[in-house]
Amino acid sequence: MTASRPSVRPARPFFSSGPCAKRPGWSAEALQGAFLGRSHRAKAGKAKLAEVIARSRAMLGLPDDYRLAVVPASDTGAVEMALWSLLGPRGVDMLAWENFGKEWVADARDELELADCRVLAADYGELPDLDKVDWSRDVVFTWNGTTSGVRVPDGDWIAADREGLAICDATSAVFAMALPWAKLDVVTWSWQKVLGGEGAHGMLALSPRAVERLEAGPPPRPLPKIFRLTKDGKLIDGVFKGETINTPSMLCVEDALDGLTWAETIGGLDALIARASANFDSIASWVDRTPWIEFLARRPETRSPTSICLKLAGSDADPKALAALLEDEGVAFDIGAYRSAPPGLRIWGGATVETADIEALLPWLEWAHDHVQTRG
Ligand SMILES: Cc1ncc(COP(=O)(O)O)c(C=O)c1O
């Protein structure tokens, strides 16, 4: 039986995995209070940056002795700053199971040309064998692989007494999944993901052991100014208090504060996690009852509740055509699989997406699938 054309549309057809949907009710009015046309180093400008740091760490429950900074160049900037600043003194295990992990492998192996670099890789849909990780080494991994929808299930595999540093790209995970902070030495993210902020800036969290490494001596390579976190062997304290390395966008800063205010209003981290879980559950029960669709992530405990990646099964419909049709209809934007991932669909389930909109999307997916298939 062919699915009939649904009558209800998602109120907000924004399902992109980054930049992600703005928070419900957002409009440019939210940026009224932005500190524009002024120096970000003026007292009030710096205070806004310090506020992003303070309110982010409070919401996420960062340990008191962790440092948190706003850094340039989004999540990539934060990750690469960490890799260039920290890697070298120990061997490193690089974990990769989708596009972004592979990018960090390319950095460590091909750009930094680290002498002792071991790659633990897995195909799209799978995780590498986490039991093989050697915690006497530094370990670089992505908490949530945004392009395969595969996440690490928890932090149980991370040694509490590790000698190396656990360096974690958490950009699609933070504010959506519980992170075991004490087991992570470097955590990075950007603003345009779960809280629906604007792209441009990254966040970099450092454990005391990561700071110790930074202060133990300069890395065996020149560092551009944009990556430098120490001066004369000491951490540059100001960077962790809102004195950014270079000029930030105060419009983006205002928007990041707006996202935090919204998140605080709805109940903080627990509420954010609950919203992502509800979105995931809605899609999971549809996948259960729909013969032509499957999760790309094979093991249920590794399925991401934010970047929900699906593949077609037993269907000759082209997922690109399906996504394009729904985009043309204005009911779902940006739900095609990432360009280097296997063909399929990717639906963002982070907190700024309303479950009602996911529910409204599902019949459209059925309709589009039938339509694309019928048309051949
Ligand atoms: C896991 C992961 N790492 C890194 C990036 C790159 O982030 P950015 O564009 O913020 O630098 C992304 C973007 O989607 C991502 O999902």
Image: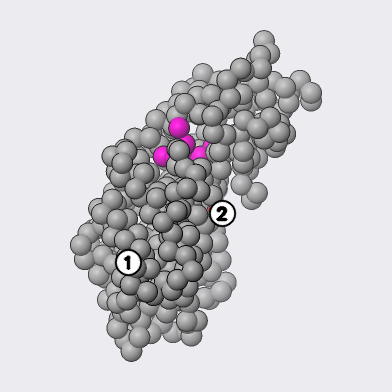
Neighbor class of circle 2 (other Cα within 10 Å; few <14, some 14-19, many 20+) is: some
Give the distance between the C-alpha atoms of the residues marked 2 and 1, in whole angstroms: 36 Å
Q: What is the three-letter code of the residue carrying label 1? A: Ala
Above or below residue 5? Residue 182 is: below
Q: Quadrant of residue 317?
A: top right
Above or below residue 354? Residue 194 is: below
Please say whether residue 321 is visible from this viewpoint.
yes
User: Which comes sooner in the sequence, label 2 or label 1?
Assistant: 1
Toward the top, the furthest residue is 1
- Return the x and y of residue 212 as percentages of the image width and height: 27, 76
Label 1 CB sits under 8 Å from any ligand 1 atom: no
* Magenta span of residues: 347-354
- Label 1's element? helix
Predominant SS of the magenta segment: loop
Rendered residue at 66%/17% (across/down): 5
In the displayed structure image, the side of residue 374 where residue 206 appears, left or right: left
Label 2 CB sits under 8 Å from any ligand 1 atom: yes
Q: Can you identify the residue that label 1 sits on?
A: 47
Rendered residue at 54%/29% (across/down): 11
Foreground: 353 or 179? 353
